[in-house]
């Protein structure tokens, strides 16, 4: 399985909501509160490790170097 973006993960959540028939039913299936699921969909909260695993993925966060960062002085 390939890596996916946050947008793709949100799309998968929306598919689950459609399959389950409501946000409430999807929240129950994902074992999260309806408010938490709503917050994820509205961009107020991040997808948790638990939800990512229910989608069949592992949540990974990483940091990249800033391109504008000055070279260190010797």
Image (spheres, rainbow, N blue to C red):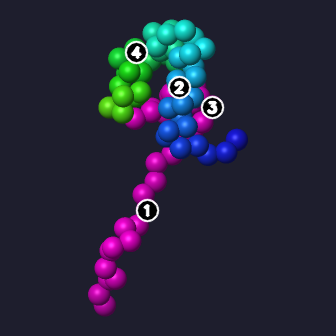
Label 3 secondary element? loop
Viewer-nearest residue: 54 or 16: 16
| Residue drawn at point x = 34 percent, y = 82 percent | 71
Q: Which residue is mark 4?
A: 33
Question: How far is the residue under mark 3 from the one under mark 4?
Answer: 19 Å
Report x, y in % for residue 46.
Answer: 40, 35
User: Does label 1 or label 2 sit earlier along the sequence?
Assistant: 2
Viewer-nearest residue: 55 or 42: 42
Q: Is residue 46 magenta?
A: yes
Question: How far is the residue under mark 3 from the one under mark 2?
Answer: 11 Å
Q: Which residue is mark 2?
A: 13
Q: Residues within 10 Å of mark 3 (few under 14, many from 20)?
A: few
Disc 1 to disc 4: CB gap under 8 Å? no
- Quarter assignment of residue 56: top right
Quadrant of the snapshot with the N terminus: top right
* Residue 28 visible, this orientation: no
Q: Which residue is mark 3?
A: 56
Label 1 secondary element? loop
The total number of labels drawn is: 4
């Amino acid at each position: 399985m390939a890596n996916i973006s946050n947008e793709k993960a949100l799309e998968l959540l929306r598919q689950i909501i459609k399959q389950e028939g409501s946000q409430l039913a999807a929240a129950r299936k994902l074992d999260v509160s309806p408010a938490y699921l709503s917050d994820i969909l509205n961009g107020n909260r991040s997808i948790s490790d638990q939800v990512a695993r229910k989608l069949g993925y592992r949540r990974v966060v990483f940091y990249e170097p800033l391109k504008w960062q000055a070279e260190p002085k010797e």
